[in-house]
Every structure is written in structure tokens, then in C-alpha cells.
């Protein structure tokens, strides 16, 4: 059995992790930590289908010893301060925050506005998007897996099959998140009177997922840039990405076949021939639904429009983290997710 600890277990992603891992036949949950709820009964915070008769512990190394893997479902800056001590105790790490996603420490510090406390570990971390060709073998051996962000997961899955063959251009990424994407806190934008029936752009110049998307894209094609505009909607969960770009092809059917071939061995990506995906269809699943369409402009140019949709808390966070754990421990990547 895999012994698991979760740091930050009382947030949205932590709660989703607990629910998924409770149904995992190869996992025992050893320790749930929460800075906010330390000492409280877990049942007083979570309404779980399978109650856990224990309390939240403080997030310190003593409460995690004996774990095989620890998930960080925390704000940025927590994982990097604890990572080395966990590794010294032979505990592997899956970081759902962003502390290990970027390889360039200067870029990370610019976008996250703080000094990285363990830059030497960035080279040891592996980006946890299993659908990247060759990535599963790297994840399997990784001491640290950097779980991708929700927007990057949606955007990259939508672009990877053709990224190497795109001409130099600025791709437009117009993406919308459910209101749970900002986490479980008292941000006024998420209060019911503010969020209900609302739709708005945010962080247009400063969203931290931009350099993450760009770093992976540039590893495939350095001629590409992204114009990324995120939006917040009143739906509770979901990421809905609409991607606009120029791509030379003869028939749309050929492009669809490229995607189907690329994701032939990816159980969590579905390619639609013609339908427009719905955010509700991916809710509570680890699936990403992708649909491709062409739009002809007035000057005769044909633009490719890609829709990429997923659940921000599952494939965009906790579900993908469990998918990565399954790969790390040589299990079926679908275990407890389908």
C-alpha cells in the first residue's frame, strides 16, 4: 500500500484529493494536515462519504514521517520550504502549487514576487503533464512532480499535437475558470452577491500561468507566443479554453486525425469530431474534452479554433495529481479516476 500525506488538506483541492484517494485500492491516507484546522475533527470540516475518524494535524515533518508520497495542496511558497526535508526522509512529492513548475528561477521569482528558497531542486522536478510524449517515464522516476496549473493543462492539451508544426505567431488564448479556481478563502469576488451571474476578465497582464504555458510551448517551438486573457465566471468549477491560431492544413478532418493519433494512448483526453464541449460534461471527472473547428475570415484566411474543457479541481488539480501518483508508483494511471 502507498502511504499518503496531504498538506493543505482542508482546501478545495485537498478535499478533492481525499475523496479520490479514499476510493483508491492501493492507498492508505496516513496524515491530513491543515494550518487553519489543526486539532479539529476531520468530520467537522468535511462531509465525506467515508468518514475519517481522526483530526487535522499541523503541517510539520514529524506528522509526515512514514509517508511514501506527500501532496502539497497549498498556496505558493509552502512546498519549497519543506521539500528538502521530505526528500531527505525518502518521501516523494507531488506539488499542486506552483513552486516547482518553472525551471528558470529568475522567471519564477519575477512572476511570484518572492525569493525561491530551494532553487537547486528545480532541476530535480518533473512537469506532471502525462500526455506530453515521453513524460510518463520521467514522472515514474521523479522525486518531485510539479502538478500543472488548471489553465496550462487545458491550453497545452489543446495545443501540443500541432505545436511543433506551427509557424511563428501569437496564439490567442481566451480562457474561463469556475469560481472555485481561486481557492477556499474569503475573497470578496467569490461572495455570492458578487459572483452570482457574473463574468469578468482578471489578471490580464499578470496571470502566473502565462510563463508556465510559454515554457512548455517553447520546449516544442520557440517561435510561439501567447496572448492569454483569463476570465472568472459564476460556474462553480471548470476551465473552458478557446484557442485561436493560424495553421496550414488541407482539411479539418486531417487535423482531427492528428489529435486522435496523438492522444490515442491518453485515457483522459477525448477528441470530438464536431460538437462544442460543455463545461458541465467534464465536471467531477479527470477528462479533458477537445473540439476543433475552422473559421474563415473576410480576407479568405482560415483560422483554427480549438476548444479545450476540463474540471479545474480534478484534471486541473487533484485528479491529475493522483494520475501522476499512479504513474510514479507503477500503477494503472486510471486507478480511482474512472
Image: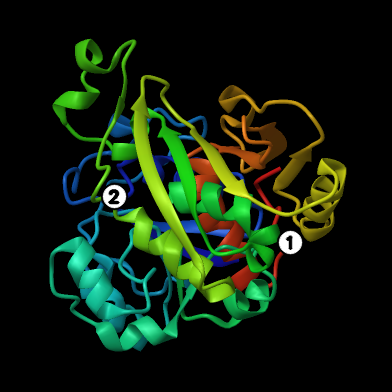
The residue tagged 1 is: 332
Q: Pinpoint residue 306: horizontal percent, then vertical percent.
A: 63, 40
Quadrant for residue 161, please give it. Answer: bottom right
Q: Tag 2, which secondary structure?
A: loop
Quadrant for residue 280, please give it. Answer: top right
The residue tagged 2 is: 207
- Rendered position, 152 above or below 4: above
Q: Residues within 10 Å of mark 1 (few under 14, many from 20)?
A: few
Quadrant for residue 62, please give it. Answer: bottom left
| Distance between mark 2 and mark 1 Cα atoms | 34 Å
In the figure, is residue 35 to the left or right of 207? left
- Rendered position, 114 above or below 236: below
Residue at image location 43% in from the left, 64% down from the top: 214
Q: Pinpoint residue 1: horizontal percent, then vertical percent.
A: 60, 66
Q: Residue furthest front?
A: 299
The answer to which of 103 and 2 lies nearer the viewer is 103
In the figure, is residue 224 to the left or right of 327? left
- Rendered position, 248 above or below 327: above
Amino acid at each position: 500500500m502507498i502511504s499518503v500525506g496531504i498538506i493543505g488538506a482542508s482546501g478545495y483541492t485537498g478535499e478533492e484529493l481525499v475523496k479520490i484517494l479514499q476510493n483508491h485500492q492501493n492507498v492508505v491516507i496516513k496524515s491530513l494536515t491543515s494550518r487553519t484546522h489543526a486539532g479539529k475533527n476531520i468530520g467537522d470540516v468535511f462531509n465525506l462519504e467515508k468518514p475519517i475518524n481522526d483530526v487535522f494535524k499541523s503541517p510539520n515533518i514529524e506528522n509526515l514521517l512514514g509517508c511514501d508520497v506527500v501532496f502539497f495542496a497549498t498556496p505558493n511558497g509552502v512546498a519549497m520550504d519543506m521539500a528538502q526535508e521530505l526528500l531527505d526522509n525518502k518521501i516523494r512529492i507531488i506539488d499542486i502549487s506552483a513552486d516547482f513548475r518553472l525551471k528558470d528561477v529568475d522567471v519564477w521569482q519575477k512572476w511570484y514576487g518572492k525569493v525561491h528558497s530551494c532553487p537547486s531542486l528545480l532541476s530535480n522536478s518533473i512537469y506532471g503533464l502525462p500526455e506530453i510524449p515521453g513524460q510518463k517515464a520521467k514522472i515514474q522516476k521523479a522525486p518531485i512532480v510539479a502538478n500543472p496549473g488548471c489553465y496550462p493543462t487545458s491550453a497545452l492539451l489543446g495545443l501540443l499535437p500541432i505545436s511543433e508544426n506551427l509557424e511563428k505567431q501569437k496564439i490567442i488564448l481566451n480562457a474561463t475558470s469556475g469560481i472555485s479556481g481561486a481557492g477556499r478563502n474569503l475573497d470578496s469576488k467569490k461572495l455570492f452577491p458578487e459572483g452570482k451571474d457574473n463574468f469578468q476578465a482578471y489578471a490580464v497582464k499578470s496571470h502566473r500561468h502565462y510563463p508556465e504555458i510559454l515554457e512548455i510551448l517553447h520546449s516544442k517551438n520557440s517561435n510561439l507566443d501567447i496572448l492569454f486573457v483569463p476570465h472568472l465566471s459564476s460556474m462553480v468549477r471548470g476551465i473552458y479554453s478557446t484557442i485561436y491560431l493560424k495553421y496550414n492544413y488541407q482539411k479539418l478532418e486531417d487535423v482531427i486525425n492528428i489529435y486522435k493519433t496523438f492522444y490515442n494512448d491518453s485515457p483522459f483526453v477525448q477528441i470530438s469530431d464536431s460538437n462544442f464541449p460543455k463545461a458541465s460534461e467534464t465536471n467531477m471527472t479527470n477528462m479533458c474534452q477537445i473540439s476543433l473547428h475552422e473559421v474563415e475570415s473576410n480576407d479568405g484566411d482560415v483560422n483554427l479554433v480549438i476548444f479545450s474543457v476540463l474540471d479545474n479541481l480534478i484534471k486541473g488539480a487533484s485528479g491529475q495529481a493522483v494520475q501522476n501518483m499512479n504513474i510514479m508508483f507503477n500503477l494503472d494511471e486510471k486507478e480511482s479516476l474512472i
